[in-house]
Amino acid sequence: MGDCCPSLDGPVWGLSSVKEGRRSQDERMTGLRGFTLVEGVVASAVLAIAVVALGASLSAGHMASYEFAQGRRATRLAEELLEYVLSLPYYDPDETSAPGPEVGEVDVRFFDNIDDFHGYVEAAGCLKDMAANDYPAEYQQFTRSVTVEAGAELLSGLGDPIPGLIVRVEVRSLRGGVWEVTRFVATPIGS
Ligand SMILES: [Ca+2]
Ligand SMILES: [Ca+2]
């Protein structure tokens, strides 16, 4: 029977162990909470940096895409007008031509040779194609202008510079972008 009863030393030793165990657990809990808090702060900082970096990356990507689209629109505007100007005769069919429109050539519909376009300007919001149709809204934030000046250029196989006209179409965006296309048109042979 005596062997079956718990020893008096047992509970005393047991309480001490419980206290020690609880203290160790508290210390671990305290350390764990501290570590978790630090870890949380670090994780939050890392997350914040990642979010900022991602936002900057998306913003840069969006801006690059926007600028690319703007470049394509401006180039289209410049090349289409240049193509139309170059489709006209070199000389005015009715009289000696001078840079700019001749008498009675009051707007682009009456321009009948290349140099009539010298000084031509289209304001933002008023851009039309050469069939007089409005360009879509995303093209209306540009201005377009033309200069036609006398010049000369060395052509392959010919020793002396050939006189002609330098046609320059410039497109500007309201944000300050500038695009330009230039073409040299030689004076017709025999003129
Ligand atoms: Ca003319
Ligand atoms: Ca003219």
Image (tube, rainbow, N blue to C red):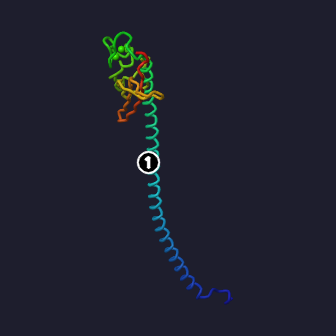
Residue 36: where, in percent of width, then height? 48, 65
- As rendered, which of 164 and 14 lies closer to the eye? 164
Residue 29: where, in percent of width, then height? 50, 71
- As rendered, which of 1 and 125 lies closer to the eye? 125
Determine the image quadrant of residue 70.
top left
Q: Residue at x 55, y 81 (%)?
A: 17
Q: Is residue 92 left or right of residue 23?
A: left
Res. 71 visible in picture: yes
Determine the image quadrant of residue 82.
top left
Q: Which residue is the extreme one toward the bottom? A: 2
Res. 138 visible in picture: no
* Quadrant of picture, ligand 2: top left
User: Disc 1, ligand 2: is the CB inside 8 Å?
Assistant: no
Q: Does residue 18 sit above or below 64 in this rendering?
A: below
Q: Does residue 67 sit above or below 91 in this rendering?
A: below
How many neighbours does mark 1 have within 10 angstroms: few (below 14), some (14-19), or many (20 or more)?
Answer: few
Residue 179: where, in percent of width, then height? 40, 32
Residue 87: where, in percent of width, then height? 45, 18
Q: Is residue 74 left or right of residue 4?
A: left
- As rendered, which of 105 and 177 lies closer to the eye? 105
- As rendered, which of 108 and 129 lies closer to the eye? 108
Q: On the rendered image, what quadrant is the N terminus found in?
A: bottom right
Q: Is residue 24 left or right of residue 129?
A: right
Q: On the rendered image, what quadrant is the C terminus found in?
A: top left
Count every numbered label the image shows and give the total: 1
Determine the image quadrant of residue 168.
top left
Q: Which residue is the extreme one toward the left? A: 103
Identify the residue under disc 1.
Answer: 56
Q: Is residue 124 left or right of residue 131?
A: left
Q: Residue at x 52, y 77 (%)?
A: 24
Q: For mark 1, give the secondary structure.
A: helix
Q: Give, as a three-letter code, the residue at label 1.
A: Ala
